[in-house]
Amino acid sequence: MTRLLGVLLMVLLVYAVLMGSFPPARSLRNHQTLAERLGYYGIPTLGIGVLIVSGGIDLSIGSLLGLTAVYFGLLLNGPLSARQTIPLAICLGGDGVLLGSALASAAGVPRRIAVLLSLLPGAGLTWACYRYLPGQHVPAWAAMLVLLGFASQIGLFHGLLITRLHLQPFLVTLCGLFMYRGLARWLSPGALALPFDPHTTALRALLVSGRMIGFPHILLWMALVALVLAVLLHASVYGRYWFAIGNNEQAARYAGIATARYKIAAYVICSTLAGLGGLVFFLMYRNATPSSAGSLLELYAITGAVLGGCNLRGGQGTIPGIVLGAAVLPLLQQICTYNVHIGSDLEYTVIGGALLLATIVNELVTQWSKRR
């Protein structure tokens, strides 16, 4: 609670500096811009926050967000080439294997037979992707669902490498950072623009551009994600297991917790929310450049989660704190934008220094409260 209050005071202080020093920042339009940016940054920050609580880390979410944004643009603009369907076909085939395995297990089929049966829908989806997607335009709603499945498969891939092959999370996701950025550049040689058609416009209004009672839809969607994760993390057995794994994975395993299963689930949640962030990015900014979309977002998200009370060693963190931590970055960006003495070259220096100072103060307050 002490750390949460500290984060709240930090957010209020930065907000007071912004509003007190720059009168144009007080406008309704600027507050709506801040809300939109909070929604955009908050979604991947919530995902990485849950993962950090469970003792994991993901350095690839910025590149995955960029890859998802680029792929979303490719699906909407079309026509797809045969080469551009390869990663999608692999991941859709993986979704089919998981679906077939789940159905076979639910029906009580023996495990070996279930594994064989699960290959049928996977092969079917892979074949359908190769057969029908090249040369086609994909509707916006279908593209959104397909890419969320694509992102979840990336998280499953990370989780399996870490839990089954016992690879280091830092190394696995660092490799992913390079792989997904390179894949995005391979899939598209240049920037992609958002097409203007009724389905895409409706999806953009639903996720990003629309407003309800003055609040941007993207902020409301982020709040909905935060609510669901708050229930999972603070009011369910899954959250208790994630905290236990983050505090001491070996002790959690000895206590009978299926640590590998819950760690994989945390990676899937993190990657899925990064994929959702990619869709939001493309709809919000109406374009995506393979070399820069989502650049540095993984660092912003990790910093926001840490500012919000997450411990990089795992086992600590709250959803309200993560949301407050995610709010710091948009406020600092606005201060840099309105201050004429800070050029674009110094923006990252100012933001990094302010975040480092806030992290140091937050840690000192936490240690002081523990000593008391």
Image (cartoon, rainbow, N blue to C red):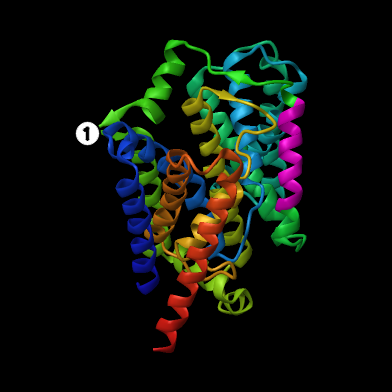
Q: Identify the residue at the far bottom of this view.
A: 372
| Extent of the magenta region | 173-186
* Foreground pick, 84 / 320: 320
Q: As drawn, is 239 to the left or to the right of 182?
A: left
* Foreground pick, 289 / 343: 343
Quadrant position of residue 247:
bottom right
* Foreground pick, 55 / 337: 337
Crowd rating for badge 1 (residues with CA inside 10 Å; few <14, some 14–19, many 20+): few
Quadrant including the C terminus:
bottom left
Quadrant including the N terminus:
bottom left
| 164 w.r.t. 101: above or below | below
| 318 w.r.t. 244: above or below | above
Q: As drawn, is 259 to the left or to the right of 335?
A: right
Q: Identify the residue at the far left of this view.
A: 213
Q: Position of residue 85 (x, y in %)?
A: 71, 23
| 26 w.r.t. 108: above or below | above
Q: Position of residue 21 (x, y in %)?
A: 34, 47
- Residue placed under numbered mark 1 in the picture: 213
- On the question of residue 102 being in view, the answer is no
Within the magenta stretch, is there residue 182?
yes
Q: Position of residue 65 (x, y in %)?
A: 60, 38
Q: Position of residue 143 (x, y in %)?
A: 55, 24
Residue type at tag 1: Ile
Residue at point 39% right, 36% down? Answer: 36
